[in-house]
Image (tube, rainbow, N blue to C red):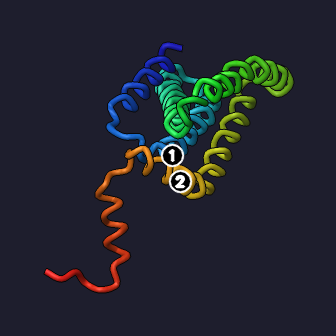
């Protein structure tokens, strides 16, 4: 648990050091995949000294994915709706965790804890792959909001306008 906690703390500090929310979609994808790979490899480990760094990686991936998702969501939601949306987000995460734990426990009772972790890790990697395939669609929905909020660098907007020029500018 300590190794997972140190990984989570490291992930939180890394995200807190970021200057912008731009690129967090990629962080969500990579972190979810990292979490899944960490679970898969941890499920196969039988040595403490291998399991500790794997739990660090798992904690790091989990925290970065959760915090990055939360940050994106809070950034794109209208201020007057933020409380309601975040309550749904919290309910989805905290409120559903006991049901997921119950399911994982019953599966582990039938096939064992290592296989349950393996299946869970595969599901995380599959979810990350699915999100990666749809990331451009998400970005196309989020970009106008970021532009309106002034989050996207103005240089990017200037480059976009400059690329639309048909004739070179006169000096």
Question: Please, what secondary structure does the residue beneath circle 2 have?
Answer: helix
Using the image, determine if residue 28 lies above or below residue 157: above
Question: Please, what secondary structure does the residue beneath circle 1 have?
Answer: helix
125 left or right, relative to 97:
left
| Residue 54 in view | no
96 left or right, relative to 133:
right
Marked residue nearer the N-terminal end (1 or 2): 1
Q: Residue at x 33, y 79 (%)?
A: 165
Q: Residue at x 68, y 41 (%)?
A: 122
Count of numbered labels shown in the rendering: 2
Q: Which residue carries the number 2 mark?
A: 139
Q: Residue at x 53, y 49 (%)?
A: 142
Q: Residues within 10 Å of mark 1 (few under 14, many from 20)?
A: many
The residue mark sitting in front, 1 or 2, is 2
Q: Quadrant of the N terminus?
A: top right
Instruction: Give the farthest residue toward the left.
Output: 171
Q: Residue at x 34, y 84 (%)?
A: 166
Q: Nearer the viewer, residue 10 or 28?
A: 28
Q: Nearer the viewer, residue 42 or 73?
A: 73
Q: Is the C-beta separation of discs 1 and 2 under 8 Å?
A: yes
Instruction: Give the farthest residue toward the front.
Output: 80
34 left or right, relative to 168:
right
Q: Residue 171, position in %: x, y?
A: 13, 80
Q: Nearer the viewer, residue 157 or 67?
A: 157
Q: CA distance from mark 1 to mark 2?
A: 8 Å
Q: Which residue carries the number 1 mark?
A: 25
């Amino acid at each position: 648990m300590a190794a997972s906690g140190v990984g989570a703390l490291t992930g939180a500090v890394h995200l807190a050091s970021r200057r912008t929310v731009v690129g967090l979609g990629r962080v969500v994808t990579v972190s979810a995949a990292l979490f899944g790979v960490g679970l898969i490899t941890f499920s196969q480990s039988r040595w403490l000294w291998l399991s500790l760094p794997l739990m660090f990686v798992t904690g790091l991936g989990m925290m970065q994915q959760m915090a990055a998702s939360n940050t994106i969501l809070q950034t794109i939601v209208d201020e007057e709706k933020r409380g309601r949306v975040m309550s749904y987000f919290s309910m989805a995460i905290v409120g559903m965790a006991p049901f997921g734990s119950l399911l994982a426990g019953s599966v582990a009772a039938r096939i064992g804890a290592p296989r349950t972790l393996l299946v869970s890790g595969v599901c995380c990697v599959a979810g990350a792959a699915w999100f990666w395939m749809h990331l451009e669609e998400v970005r196309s929905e989020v970009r106008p909001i970021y532009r309106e909020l002034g989050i996207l660098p103005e240089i990017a907007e200037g480059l976009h306008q400059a690329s639309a020029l048909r004739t070179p500018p006169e000096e």
